[in-house]
Structure formats: C-alpha cells, structure tokens
Image: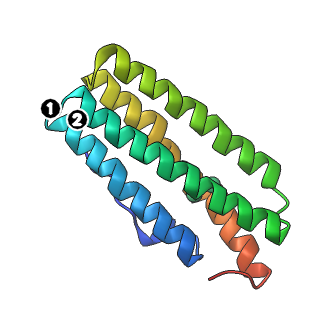
Amino acid sequence: MAIKWHESLAVGVAEIDEQHQELFRRLNQLLEACNQGKGKESVRELVTFLQEYVVLHFAAEEKLQRLSGFPEYALHRAKHAEFMRAAGQLKFTLEEQGPTLSFIIAVNKVVVDWLVQHISKMDKDLGRFLAAEGQGK
Ligand SMILES: [Fe+2]
Ligand SMILES: [Fe+2]
C-alpha cells in the first residue's frame, strides 16, 4: 500500500512540502522492499535512511518555528520527539522478527498514519501561522 502526497497536505512552505514529499518517497521504498520480500539487511538500511531524513526534516521545521516565534513550538517539538521514540521501537521489531507482516502493519500505523495526521494538523497549523506572519514560501 503506497502513501501518496496530495495537495491537501500542502503546508505552503516550499522547503517543508518538498521534504514531506521526499519522506513519502522513502517510506514507499521501505514498504515496497518489505512487500517484495527483501531481507532484513536491505530493509534496515532503508529504515536508517528514513530515520536520518526525519531528523533533518524535524530540525528544519523546528528551526522555522523558533525563528518565527511559533507559539506551539514546545508541543510540536514534543510530538516530533515522541515519533522518534516510536520509530526507534520499530527498529527493535525489525531486528527481532525481520520485515514480517506485523512489522509492515506497525510501519503503517506508527509512521504512515502518524505522518499524515501530523502534517494535516500540526504542520499545517505552522504553515497557517507563517502565512499570517508573512513568512510563508
Ligand atoms: Fe513535517
Ligand atoms: Fe512537524
């Protein structure tokens, strides 16, 4: 099952929207590798790749929030940290059982669903705030 970026997920800041699209691309690579029955090694590489990209992405968003004086910075940052912990757990699952069906289900729940919800609500709130402040794009 592929995750698709859609215009309705646009935050309105080019850098952020591009990063979200890249995240979705990498996530699809990961899900595809699992579905194709690729081994633990290749799946682990893709998970690490994705984790590193998420770190960069969260840092970029948080920097924008600090520079603009975004009032929900602390909460937003805490949600990012929560996600990183949950994503870290996925690595344990992968090490323990390999890219099994339950691993794929966990990736869908912990990463795919979370990302779509987080972008739809919190990242878009940031986009609206920046637009109102004249700092979008
Ligand atoms: Fe984001
Ligand atoms: Fe975010």
Q: CA distance from mark 1 to mark 2?
A: 5 Å
CA neighbours of label 1 inside 10 A, class few (<14), some (14 to 19), many (20+): few
Residue 46 — which label? none
Q: Quadrant of the C terminus?
A: bottom right
96 sits to left or right of 80: left
16 sits to left or right of 23: right
Q: Quadrant of the N terminus?
A: top left
Q: Quadrant of ligand 1?
A: bottom right
Residue at image point 19% right, 29% down: 39
Which three-letter amino acid code belongs to the residue tagged 2?
Answer: Cys
- The answer to whether mark 2 is within 8 Å of ligand 1 is no
Residue at image point 42% right, 40% down: 48
Q: Please, is residue 49 above or below residue 11 in the view?
A: above
Which three-letter amino acid code belongs to the residue tagged 1?
Answer: Gly
Q: Secondary structure at mark 1?
A: loop
Q: Mark 1 touching mark 2, by CB under 8 A?
A: yes
Residue 35 location (% of width, % of height): 18, 36
Residue at image point 51% right, 70% down: 17
Residue furthest top in the image? 96
Q: Secondary structure at mark 2?
A: helix
Residue 23 location (% of width, % of height): 43, 56
Residue identified by numbered label 2: 34
Quarter of the image for residue 67 reads bottom right
Q: Please, is residue 38 above or below residue 2 in the view?
A: above
Q: Tell me, yes or no, if residue 109 can be seen here.
A: yes
Q: Tell me, yes or no, if residue 116 can be seen here.
A: no
Residue identified by numbered label 1: 37
Residue 114 location (% of width, % of height): 52, 43
Residue at image point 47% right, 70% down: 18
Quarter of the image for residue 64 reads bottom right
- Residue toward you, 83 or 127: 83
